[in-house]
Image (cartoon, rainbow, N blue to C red):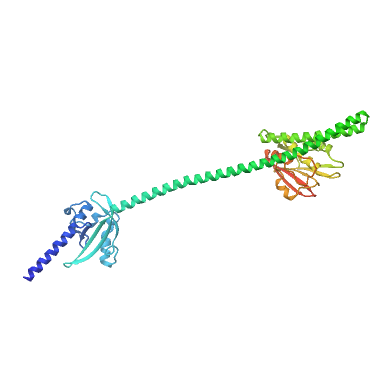
């Protein structure tokens, strides 16, 4: 009686175990020590797409893609020989091979059971396809989101850059407006002074000429006609500076390069300029180089040199020496104008080439403040550069440098 109850109990447990295996969500596969399939529950058959008779007795490697397929028997033999656990009792994520040759990921856990004096390996298979698909969708969504963020960031950065550019443009416009206002102020101040002085001189001299004409006084008349000529010359110089500046601003001045002799041009120039020198002022010219042939714009270069020498004459006293030097070699042409005049204060030198700017030590010496600005722009049109070295009360040296090809 007890034996029958025990047998019934075992049968009930067996039926229960079979029911659990048959209804399990995960796949369950048993293989023998050679790796041959002994059983598969319905879930495992559904996962791999087979009917049980198609697989029972076949090597488990039929359910594996390469490289696991070719290496599986070696894994099993190595475990049985060394007892080193790589999957058995540990579990890992692997790829499975369905009947339709498609692969899928699953979590594999293998346990070893000794039953009826036999070693049986049981594999528990949890299909990860849906989880992997969800992970991939999440990854794709994340990448798409990151891409959108990058695009939005680029758009935002572009907007920020445009805003910064607009801010810079506004600042630049305000700065230019400020500079323009300063130029207007300098111009009004300069024009009111520079025009008024020679015009007053012209008016006074004309009145005195009328007086001297009533009582013939040739020396007096000549004296005042000379003053009129000098005043007219000053006004002409001022107007010429304005005209040169206007043409430069309008882009109407271009450098027309041609070959000429710098020595001949310099000698003719010095002869002209010596006529307007003060008492006992002398201009000394020296050329260094075996040739005098250069390729520049002779008109622009002559105007630049006249401006520099005029400044040297104007800002130097009587009984002084003005040096005008040209040096030509294969690499460059260097023109130097050196005087021993009042010099330029250090704090004014940074603004020296700005239009209408005059150093604060010029006093009543006439000038527009345009000369050096015009010289610099003429020289740059010809591809050259201007250097200035000056010390207050010790003179000024202006150097023009032109590369020669």
Give me the residue at 60% from left, 44% from top: 171
- Vertical order, 287 against 107 (above or below): above
Q: Quadrant of the N terminus?
A: bottom left
Q: Quadrant of the C terminus?
A: top right
Give me the residue at 73% from left, 34% from top: 299
Q: Nearer the viewer, residue 52 or 315?
A: 315
Asked whether residue 285 is in view, the answer is no
Among all residues in the image, which is located at the extreme bottom? 2
Q: Nearer the viewer, residue 376 or 98?
A: 376
Q: Looking at the picture, how far across and down is residue 220, in whole percent?
A: 91, 33
- Vertical order, 237 against 105 (above or below): above
Asked whether residue 27 is in view, the answer is yes
Q: Looking at the picture, how far across and down is residue 60, in whole percent?
A: 23, 57
Give me the residue at 31% from left, 53% from top: 132
Left or right, 177 with respect to 115, comes to right
Left or right, 211 with respect to 298, comes to right
Q: Nearer the viewer, residue 313 or 214?
A: 214
Q: Looking at the picture, how far across and down is residue 281, in whole percent?
A: 85, 42
């Amino acid at each position: 009686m007890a034996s029958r109850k025990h047998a019934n109990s075992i049968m009930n447990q067996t039926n229960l175990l079979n029911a659990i295996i048959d209804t399990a969500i995960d796949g369950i596969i048993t293989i023998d020590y050679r790796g041959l399939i002994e059983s598969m529950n319905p879930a495992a058959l559904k996962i791999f797409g087979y009917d049980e008779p198609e697989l029972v007795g076949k090597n488990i490697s039929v359910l594996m893609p390469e490289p696991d397929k070719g290496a599986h028997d070696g894994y099993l033999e190595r475990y049985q020989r060394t007892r080193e656990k790589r999957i058995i009792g540990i579990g890992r994520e692997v790829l499975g091979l369905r009947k339709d040759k498609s692969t899928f990921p699953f979590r594999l856990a293998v346990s070893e059971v000794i039953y009826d004096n036999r070693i049986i390996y049981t594999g528990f298979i949890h299909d990860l396809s849906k989880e992997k698909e969800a992970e991939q969708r999440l990854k794709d969504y994340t990448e798409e989101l990151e891409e959108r963020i990058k695009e939005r960031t680029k758009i935002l950065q572009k907007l920020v850059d445009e805003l910064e550019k607009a801010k810079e443009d506004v600042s630049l416009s305000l700065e230019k407006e400020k500079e323009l206002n300063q130029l207007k102020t300098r111009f009004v101040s300069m024009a009111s002074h520079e025009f008024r002085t020679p015009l007053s001189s012209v008016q006074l001299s004309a009145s005195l000429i009328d007086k001297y004409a009533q009582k013939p006084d040739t020396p007096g008349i000549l004296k005042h006609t000379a003053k009129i000529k000098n005043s007219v010359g000053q006004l002409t110089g001022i107007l010429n500076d304005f005209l040169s500046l206007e043409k430069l601003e309008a882009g109407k001045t271009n450098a027309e390069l041609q070959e000429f002799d710098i020595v001949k041009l310099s000698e003719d120039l010095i002869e002209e300029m010596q006529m307007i020198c003060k008492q006992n002022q002398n201009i000394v010219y020296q050329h260094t180089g075996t040739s005098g042939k250069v390729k520049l714009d002779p008109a622009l270069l002559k105007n630049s040199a006249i401006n520099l020498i005029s400044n040297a004459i104007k800002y130097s006293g009587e009984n002084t020496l003005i040096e005008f030097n040209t040096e030509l070699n294969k690499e460059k042409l260097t023109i130097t104008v050196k005087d021993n005049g009042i010099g330029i204060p250090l704090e004014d030198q940074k603004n020296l080439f700005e239009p209408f700017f005059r150093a604060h030590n010029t006093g009543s010496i006439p000038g527009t403040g345009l000369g050096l600005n015009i010289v610099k722009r003429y020289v740059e049109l010809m591809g050259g550069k201007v250097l200035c070295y000056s010390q207050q009360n010790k003179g000024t040296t202006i150097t023009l440098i032109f590369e020669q090809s």
